Image (cartoon, helix red, strand yellow):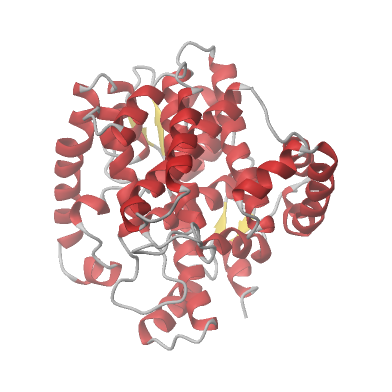
Amino acid sequence: MVSVRKSLLQLLFAGSFMKRWNDKHRSMDLVEIDKQAHKMMVAWMLYELNSRHLPEPERLALGLEIVEGGLFEYLYRLVITDIKPPVFYQIKANPDHYGRLTAWVFDQLEPRVRDLGDDFGHRLREYLAVPEGTTPARRILDAAHLYASGWEYSLIKRDNPWDDELLEIESSFRDGLARFADLTGVADLAAGLFEGKKTALGHFGRLLGQLRFQTRWSQTPRIPETSVLGHMFLVAAYAYFFSLAVDACPARRLNNFFAGLVHDMPELLTRDIISPVKQSVAELGGMIKEYENAEMSRRVFSVLTEGGYAGLSDRLAYFLGIEIGSEFFECIRDEEGRAVRVTPEDLSERCNRDGFDPKDGQLLKVCDSLAAFIEAYTALRNGITSDQLQRAVWRLRTQYASVVLFGRVHVGALLADFD
């Protein structure tokens, strides 16, 4: 039976500490978890655009390969930490050196992923054993990696005019993305990033990247600080592993990951209003939701639709629960393709089949709360004294003390593992 443990939750959060571009002057910290979030958002776009011609089973298989591949690469990165990319590329080019490094990495990861089951461990080992690949999933992930890293490069370029590596770095991103020009969407993303062209996809990619500028818990000092972008990746990763634990069908697993990955996107457009304020002021939550939907329609949905990406717009709206009122409501597609709200019980029993295109609500909310708990708990453990953080930890422990997801995941017991 698959289960999720404290050690895995903490490992996934560790990317919040990992600084990127550490040898360059930066006007702000760039951290690994933010880059991974941006990468997987771009991977989602490329997946949607390049899988429409596939039969449904093949399309789902490709999506799962992309999601798990992204998670495997992130876990690998968490272990090798400070190895600079040029050195790592040399290691990957030497099969013996890469094999030895990867065997050591898997030894470090195995205790953390053991409870996810033998099948997951086998897929992890099999994926990491191959340093490079030309499968559609690998190519989409590689293109997404280059775009997200190139976006970060665009932030630091002007801060390092004396750096003689800059031209070589920029060329590597341009040339790298050019190798994937046959993938639908890559040309538009590259044109928006490197040439300043106003493409719909380029606009969307930049907008997603801006979520790293928005700090969570903005009124409370924390170590580490986390962005809305990184938080969404954490929720997505938690949602995927919880989906494995509740035996979700492939489509449901995929939807839960991508829904977690974008669930806070509207906050970029309306600023983050802390939950206690939303809950304390009568009707404020509903008013904010109206503003968010209006801004999403104006700045995201309409731009994508008018730019020829109506399919992306529709899919994003489904993940955000626009038709049913909340991203935290369970939903499926009916026979006419409309989003329909269902109960958690219906979702896990009658509708836990790929044909329903199912997406969780309560499970996503639990993962959102767990990510907030990890953020607050870690800050307190790192010596930050804050009434707000202490109240948040106490409130979440109390709220979820007796919550069990679909009879399989005891959330209260998981939180009790944190001393």
Relative horizontal placement of residue 104, taking residue 402 as reference (left or right): right
Nearer to us in this view, 24 or 16: 24
Relative horizontal placement of residue 292, taking residue 328 as reference (left or right): left
Nearer to us in this view, 340 or 212: 212
Instruction: Identify which residue is drawn at 82% across, 54% down.
Output: 104
Relative horizontal placement of residue 209, taking residue 82 as reference (left or right): left
Quarter of the image that includes the C terminus: bottom right
Instruction: Identify which residue is drawn at 47% across, 44% down.
Output: 344
The location of residue 99, given as percent across then percent down, is 83, 42
Q: Is residue 85 at all visible to an observer of this figure?
A: yes
Relative horizontal placement of residue 231, taking residue 246 as reference (left or right): left
The correct choice, above or below, for 111 with respect to 399 in the image is: above
Instruction: Identify which residue is drawn at 43% across, 59% down.
Output: 30
The location of residue 105, given as percent across then percent down, is 77, 53
The location of residue 90, given as percent across then percent down, is 70, 42
Nearer to us in this view, 22 or 297: 22
Nearer to us in this view, 339 or 369: 369
Q: Is residue 264 at all visible to an observer of this figure?
A: no
Which corner quadrant of the image does residue 48 belong to? top left
The correct choice, above or below, for 119 with respect to 364 in the image is: above
The correct choice, above or below, for 206 with respect to 269 in the image is: above
Instruction: Identify which residue is drawn at 77% across, 39% down.
Output: 119
The location of residue 235, given as percent across then percent down, is 48, 53
Please state the total of marks drawn on the protein image. Answer: 0
